[in-house]
Image: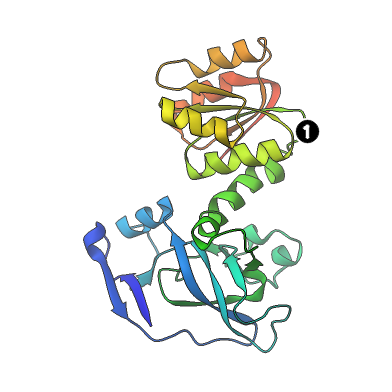
């Protein structure tokens, strides 16, 4: 099959389009024919030299496609079924996995990080990673979902314990995690304040459901938050930028509020 691999770290020039053997399907796995694989910033970090990645390596964490073959122990699927892949790799039998804490498994990683990803024609994954998608969702759209929505859901639901009626500040509304965060917060009927860097991005944030948008280049985030919330502050800050916005994120919280962060 064809795949794009890296044999060394560096810029885009290290990407090689080449022939490699097809994956050997285990009995507990499903073979997926890749139809779309989105780019995540993780791909750039790995390509530039994140340690402990074995080379040659296939990048790609966000995958959608069709089921090509089903292992003997996998059930509930059919050939040709349209799916996306949950992007996490874990053993699924240790104490942490059986307790639902797969991200604490000693084998935990992300597709395309410590294990090969989806920049290839075929990928074999455990049946637990298979997520059927509706016909209304195209492969390109489906491939934009996995890693950022898993991250966003874990931040807002798993860590922050988001509740209906709360006010949520989402930094970087047009980033992958920001796009996910706005939609997850609105799913919980929250009031959403988002930040964006220009008019086009601000309009996109509103289209996704943001109730208020702050221009983080032209306005001071915490001051605008205080105006919007009548000096109260927000219940949750979804922070994924880092040092550039950290102080403003903290200042935007109400007393007892929650700040969740990732990738910063």
Q: Residue at x 39, y 86 (%)?
A: 21
Residue 199 in sight? yes
Please say whether residue 55 is visible from this viewpoint: no
Which image quadrant for residue 102? bottom right
Residue drawn at 56 percent across, 62 percent down: 87
Percent across and percent down for residue 228 are: 62, 14
**SS assignment at label 1:** loop
Q: Is residue 122 above or below residue 144?
A: below
| x, y percent for residue 212 | 58, 22
- Seen in the image, is 36 located left or right of residue 77? left
Instruction: Say whether residue 39 is left or right of residue 152.
Output: left
Residue at point 62%, 69% (across, down): 129
Give the quarter of the image for residue 29. bottom right
> Residue extending furthest left?
13
Give the colouring mode of the picture.
Answer: rainbow
Q: Which residue is mark 1?
A: 164
Would you say 54 lies left or right of 241 here? left
Q: Nearer the viewer, residue 195 or 90?
A: 195
Residue 229 on image: x %, y %: 66, 15
User: Residue 172's spot in the image, x, y percent?
Assistant: 48, 33
Residue 167 is drawn in which quadrant? top right
Going by the picture, which residue comes out furthest to the front?
136
């Amino acid at each position: 099959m064809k795949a794009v691999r890296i044999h060394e770290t560096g810029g885009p020039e290290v990407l090689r389009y080449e022939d490699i053997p097809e994956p050997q399907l285990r009995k507990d796995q499903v073979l997926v024919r890749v139809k779309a694989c989105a780019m995540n910033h993780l791909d750039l970090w790995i390509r530039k030299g994140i340690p402990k990645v074995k080379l040659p390596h296939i990048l790609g964490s966000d995958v959608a496609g069709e089921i090509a073959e089903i292992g003997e122990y996998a059930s509930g699927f059919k050939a040709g079924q349209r799916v996306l892949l949950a992007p996490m790799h874990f053993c699924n039998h240790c104490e942490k996995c059986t307790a639902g804490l797969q991200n604490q498994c000693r084998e935990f990683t992300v597709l395309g990080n410590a294990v090969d990803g989806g920049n290839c024609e075929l990928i074999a994954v455990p049946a637990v990673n298979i997520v059927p998608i509706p016909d209304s969702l195209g492969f390109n759209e489906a491939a934009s979902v996995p890693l950022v929505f898993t991250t966003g859901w874990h931040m807002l639901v798993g860590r922050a314990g988001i509740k209906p009626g709360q006010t949520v500040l989402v930094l970087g509304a047009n980033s992958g995690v920001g796009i996910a965060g706005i939609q997850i917060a609105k799913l919980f009927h929250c009031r959403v304040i988002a930040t964006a860097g220009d008019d086009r991005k601000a309009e996109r944030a509103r289209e996704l459901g943001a109730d208020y948008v702050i221009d983080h280049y032209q306005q001071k985030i915490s001051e605008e938050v205080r105006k919007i919330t009548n000096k109260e502050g927000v219940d949750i800050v979804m922070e994924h930028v880092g040092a550039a916005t950290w102080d403003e994120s903290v200042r935007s919280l109400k007393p007892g509020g929650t700040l969740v962060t990732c990738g910063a």
